[in-house]
Amino acid sequence: MGLVEQVQATVRQTINFCAREKFWLTCTAAIVLIWTVELYAVQARTLIYPNEVGARFAFWAPKVRLVLDLLFISTLTVWFRPRWLCLIMVGSFFAYLGLVTYFQYFQRPISLLTIFTNWREGIEISGFALDMFPKRAVVLLAAALVAQLTALFLSRRVALPRNCARLGAATLAIGFLTLFVGLNFWDPLSFIQTKRGVGRLGAVRGYLGPWAAEWYYLRDSKVLGQALDLRKIKYDRLTPAEADIPIHKHLVIVQAESLDFNILGHMVDGVAVTPFLNRLRDISMFYRVRAMHYNVSADADFVAMNGVSGSKHANTYMIPNYPYENTTPQLLARCGFTVSSFHGYNGMFYRRRPAFEKMGFDQIYFREELERPPYNLRVDRWGVPDRDVLMLSALKMRGAKEPTCHFVITLTTHTPYTMLQASEREIYPNPTSTLEHYMNNMRYLDNCLRDYFTALGSGTTVMLYADHPTEQSCAGGDFAPDRSDGREYIPVFIYDTDQDLSKLQKTRKSPLRRDGSLNLVDMINYLRGQVELAYGTDSAEAADRPQAAQTPP
């Protein structure tokens, strides 16, 4: 029998089998329908592209993606036997839940590079998974999984003949690949290198296409090359518009975890959530700027410590051979400052420690240093609590005789906002939602910063900024996170312990101060410029200073 005859015979056999086993056909169709709708819904929820698209693309993209999803799911369902389908369905449940959870926190689809570079960090925080998973998504995805497994169980008594399954799966796969490849002429995957990200390319083809493009086009030195190109872009738009300010010999830069611009001035039952920060903004130079939050929270501290934008494709700390040149610690060292960093979590998370060592810090304090003698600071589920880290910084700063800068990254108020002790829950003693937990965390942060700023004493300049706003799951009542159209906005304070800087701020009444046109790089470069203006960079003493971080005493 020739090939054509074999195919014809298999087609007839398949038709006869489906006509005879109508219950099996109904169950299989239900699996395909539920699974396809589930996949399509997850993609629609997470593959968000912040920029506008043309009307033609907006009309056709979701329809083409639906066809691809249907062909893909149908291929899996026809090809694999029930025991393997069961495993794939369960795996899909966790994969979809991961996609939705990542999107909820970062408000962007996850990239393959992020998965490859940060999988260790993902495993490390897996103990918080139950707190971080969006409950509604868990319920909906679990219901879809139960429906799929039920249909699979009911159809188990019979199975499509293997030759029929092979032919059907091959036909569906060819259809999928033909459409998938053809799309590249309309919407090239190579654009992942320039103007299109996972969300835009995925809008028409799901995750597999852009992930394949990342693997092919952004491997090895290509990500480094793009990160180096970003170093050539100079953001310093605030300096020409703003006044010069004095910079004290004690300088502190604080990165506040999850501090949302919209929490400032927010009231719960007539009580201010952040009373200290509300007062601080009135006597500081104060701005609303765009966050630099492309991949992970480390994007923000990278910006503050380097004065340039980080990679938009991967955690810059994890890019091999990235050059740490003219960093903020190096600039401060040239100006005669001793520079230390403080963070209550472990130094290898996001590979911060190796990067910080290259940046020029004199001392680096991570959990590994803080929990051992001579400090012996308490460690909770997250790490060393912010209150203790900030107080250690204040103690060291008050004892410093020479120009000194501390860079502090807070930790306790990280999502899922469940690290507080019962005595620290001031707004909602018995929180029942993510929003209520978040309000408690912002009051805790406000209290910590109040005590820290007070303990620093006079003669100190402080720059306080957030790494990113809170996630959308904290929206509720009259509070909404400061996010829009895929963009995130954060507050930035520049405070002087000895005078009211708000009176010096030229942009106090300018739209530039809060319209989001400035970003975090603009802010740190303004501060760097003020340090250079005040101290210069030609000190012979500074030139002799070591540029490598040392282990703290």
Image (cartoon, rainbow, N blue to C red):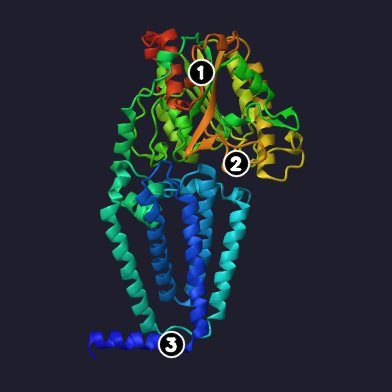
User: On screen, 473 above or below 326?
Assistant: below
**Residue highlighted by disc 3:** 17
User: On screen, 178 above or below 466?
Assistant: below
Residue 219 in view in this figure:
no
Separation of marks 3 and 2 at Cα, in angstroms: 53 Å
Q: Amino acid at mark 1?
A: Cys
Which mark is in front, 3 or 2?
3
Q: Amino acid at mark 3?
A: Phe
Q: Residues within 10 Å of mark 1 (few under 14, many from 20)?
A: many
Direction from residue 107 to residue 475 in the image, left or right? right
Q: Residue at x 36, y 46 (%)?
A: 54
**Residue highlighted by disc 1:** 405
The percent coordinates of residue 360 (x first, y second) are: 42, 24
Which mark is in front, 1 or 2?
2
User: On screen, 188 above or below 489?
Assistant: below
Which mark is in front, 3 or 1?
3
**SS at mark 1 in the image:** strand
Q: Amino acid at mark 2?
A: Thr
**SS at mark 2 in the image:** loop
Of labels 1 and 2, earlier in sequence is 1
Q: Nearer the viewer, residue 534 or 290?
A: 290
Q: Residues within 10 Å of mark 3 (few under 14, many from 20)?
A: some
Snapshot quadrant of residue 309: top left
Q: Residue at x 40, y 14 (%)?
A: 240
Direction from residue 535 to residue 123 in the image, left or right? right
User: Which disc is residue 415 wearing?
Assistant: 2
